[in-house]
Amino acid sequence: MQNKEKYVVGVDLGGTKMAVALFDGQGALVNRDRMETAGVKTAAELTQHLVQMINQVAQGRPLSGIGLASAGAVNSREGIVLHGTNLPEWENVPLKKWMEESLGTEVQVVNDANAAAWGEYVRGAGKGSENMVYVTLSTGIGAGIVLDGKLLLGSHSFAGELGHTILDPDGPLCRCGNRGCWETVSSGTAIRDSALRLLEHTPSAIADIAAAAGEAVSAKHIFEARKRSDPVAIQVLDQAIYFMALGLVNVIHSFNPDRIVVGGGVSKAGDLLFPALRAETQRLVMEPYRRTFEIVPAGLKDDAGLVGAAALFHTCDGR
């Protein structure tokens, strides 16, 4: 990215929408577009739409690369999406090959959590750290790991699937087939499900808050009830934060990061989450690791995948 006349495109391909953005040589956003994917019927059709969107945002500007973040399992070394999420025919899609043939520009493909991690490291809350772990607490739990300035992919590009580390072998059944994975006890979904079980036989402000908003119960209503010292919300969140911290302790003991960046919908709870999470993590971690790391909220919000995908073509020295 030393040539400032060259531009980079970042793509964030999710289960319901795809977003495309053009960045200049300094990483500044120049142009962007997005579309819903609900009406798309085949992987080839979706790729054609994607190519059209890239051409539209580029508007004839010279591209030095296209970074693509895809939900699901990705073989980054060959640029193949092995299994997508809620997308038609999105199995073993040679996305790198198809797009390079159509656009004549180098394409890199990574898992969306890895892209978000790299985005936070290069441009967001991880900037300035040496070893960083990004964790997104959302419907599930995703993660990406940067060690010594390099994105950790592993032998088959599957590194960083921390949401499926097992914290409670007798815990809830996970979609992966195991029990007690981190995301079954700490994600937004886990928080909601835990509250719903208690609401079956215990009165709580949670249901009233959700009903007043005309919404189904979710983690945000539970955090709101916690503000009111609601006993059910306190019980649910104390348990969830304990398991969040336990997961982070495993991360700290395994990777010794100097910074942990936490994103996703649950992180929007802000001061209702972070002070308790920091304190519980410090309590559980081994003594030599205490005060060797910081836990901070993500900085790039919903654009982390876009920024991170484009930043695959930024050198660490230039960040």
Image (cartoon, rainbow, N blue to C red):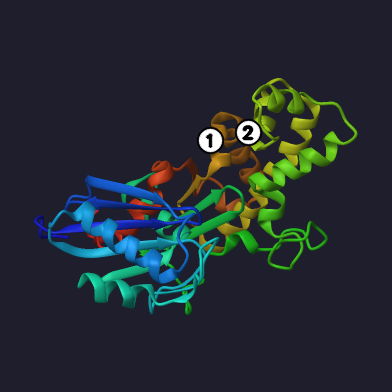
Q: In which quarter of the image is residue 102?
A: bottom left
Picture coordinates of residue 158, whole percent (x, y): 51, 72
Question: Could you say whether the residue bearing mark 1 is in a helix, strand or loop?
Answer: helix
Residue 224 figure quarter: top right
Q: For the view shown, which residue lies furthest in the right direction?
A: 201
Q: Pointer 2: what residue? A: 220
> Residue 92, image x and y in percent?
48, 77
User: Looking at the image, is 93 positioned above or below residue 110?
Assistant: below
The residue shown at (71%, 20%) is 228
The circle on residue 268 is: 1
Label 1 vs label 2, nearer the camera:
2
Give percent across and percent down for residue 306: 35, 52
Label 1–label 2 contact, CB within 8 A: yes
21 relative to 212 in the view: left or right: left
Between 47 and 25, the one lying in front of the other is 47
Which kind of residue does numbered mark 1 sit on? Lys
Q: Which of 224 and 61 is in front in this view?
A: 61
Give me the residue at 12% from left, 57% from top. Answer: 61
